[in-house]
Structure formats: C-alpha cells, structure tokens
Image: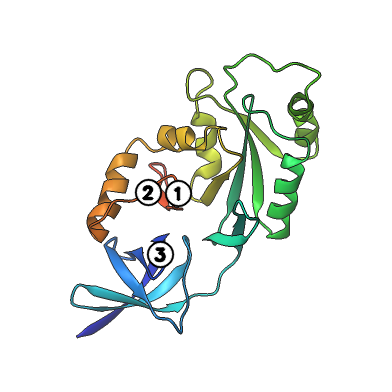
Amino acid sequence: MTRRHEALVLVSYGSHGIVELDDGRRLDCKYRRQVGRPFCGDRVSVAIHGDAGVVEAIRPRRNRFVRADRQQRQHVVAANLDRVLIVLALKPLPSRDLLDRYLLAVHSLGIEPVIVLNKVELDAPPADSAGAAVISRLPQYEALGYVVLKTSCKGDPGVAVLEPVLENRTSILVGQSGVGKSSLVRALLPDLDIQTGELSRVTGKGTHTTTTTILYALPGGGRLM
C-alpha cells in the first residue's frame, strides 16, 4: 500500500535525497524526472511504498538561495530561508565589496541578513589594509539597522550570541573560505557527528559535510545549513 506524507528535504543529491517526514522519520527518496530536483529546505510530498520513497511534488518556495561555483555558474543550494548569516573574519580579511554584494543578494530575496564577525580573538589587522576598512565600517552597518554579532570558536565571546537569532528559524552560514563557518557549525551543534551519522545510515553511504548543503536541527529549535 502506498502512503503519502509531507516532508522536509535535509540533503539533496543528484537523483535522490534524504527527507524528514512530519512524524520525524528520515527516508532516502528518489526524485521523479517530471517533478525536478528539490533543494535543501524544500517542503515536498512523498509517496512511500514499503521502505522506498519517491518525491511526487515540490511545494511552493518562499525563496531560493543561489551560490556561484569557481566557473561562476549559478547553483541553487537552499530554499525557504528565514535568515542568512554573512560570516566575516579578522583572518582572512574580506575584500572591499564582499559584504555589500552579500547584502544586496540577500535583500533581493527578501531574506533577513545578519552580519557575523568571527575570529575576534585574533589581533586587529593593519589599519591601512582594504579588509580592515571593511571591519572598521561595521558600526555604520549597525547604525543602519543591521544586526552585527562578534564570535570566536577559540575563546570569548564564544558563539552563544548566535543562538537567539537562529532559534525557530531556518538559516544558512555564508562567507569566503577560511572564515570559520565549519567551526561555527560544530560549536552550535554539539551532536553534529550524531546527526551526520544518522544521514549516512539512511543512505548507507558517507556524507561529505564540507561540500554538500545539509539541514541540521539546532538544539534550541530551528534549522541550520
């Protein structure tokens, strides 16, 4: 007998993905070619026959977050976001226009941005560097109404300041390589290895957490990619 359920896409591969059913069960589902590929964060309708699942429909999206690869090709990586956390760091320093480009992209989708300055335990950069100028202007962004938060995964102030902005929302961390996104995820998710292991158990394969967008459950409520 075929049963139908509403589900949330936790991770999406080429022709299949892992979904979480509304009763909490997780299932590896195939995609129908005529339906198309859902993305991490999509709500979908799933038909289940025995232990096999098929995505039959993708529910309307509130938004889609796109990221460019090294060849500047655009790829959708997430859907239905509430917040985008733009992560900067004292090392590597951001380029002069990086923050503004992120803010423009996030605003165009109607998503709320949060600016995160990570690695604040490091020494301040030389004042004459372009990246230092971006960091020095963060109070101006605060004056414009943006939320600007300072974090460190190696000391004070820690990452607890992020918990209220993530609670009961679906969020994604973005930023250039090396700013500490993976470290922030590990600090926010003490059960990260357990969640990743559960996804691997469902598929019977390993899950590449640094190259695949995965929707994790936060301990205080909410979801994080």
x, y percent for residue 130: 78, 27
Label 1 – label 3 distance at C-alpha:
20 Å
Q: Nearer the viewer, residue 49 or 22?
A: 49
Kindly identify the residue that appears in the image at 42 percent across and 72 percent down: 44
Helix, strand, or loop for circle 2? loop
Helix, strand, or loop for circle 1? loop
In the picture of the structure, the residue carrying the numbered disc 1 is 211
Helix, strand, or loop for circle 3? strand
* Label pair 2/1, CB-CB below 8 angstroms: yes
Q: Amino acid at mark 1?
A: Thr
How crowded pointer 1 is (Cα within 10 Å; few <14, some 14-19, many 20+) is rated as: few
Q: Quadrant of residue 114?
A: top right
Label 3 – label 2 distance at C-alpha:
20 Å
x, y percent for residue 212: 44, 52
Kindly identify the residue that appears in the image at 50 percent across and 24 percent down: 158
Q: Which residue is outermost to the top?
A: 123
Q: Amino acid at mark 3?
A: Leu
* Label pair 1/3, CB-CB below 8 angstroms: no
Q: Amino acid at mark 2?
A: His
In the picture of the structure, the residue carrying the numbered disc 2 is 208
How crowded pointer 3 is (Cα within 10 Å; few <14, some 14-19, many 20+) is rated as: many
Kindly identify the residue that appears in the image at 46 percent across and 84 percent down: 34
Q: Earlier in the sequence, mark 1 or mark 3?
A: 3
Label 2 – label 1 distance at C-alpha:
6 Å
In the picture of the structure, the residue carrying the numbered disc 3 is 8
Q: Nearer the viewer, residue 220 or 155?
A: 155
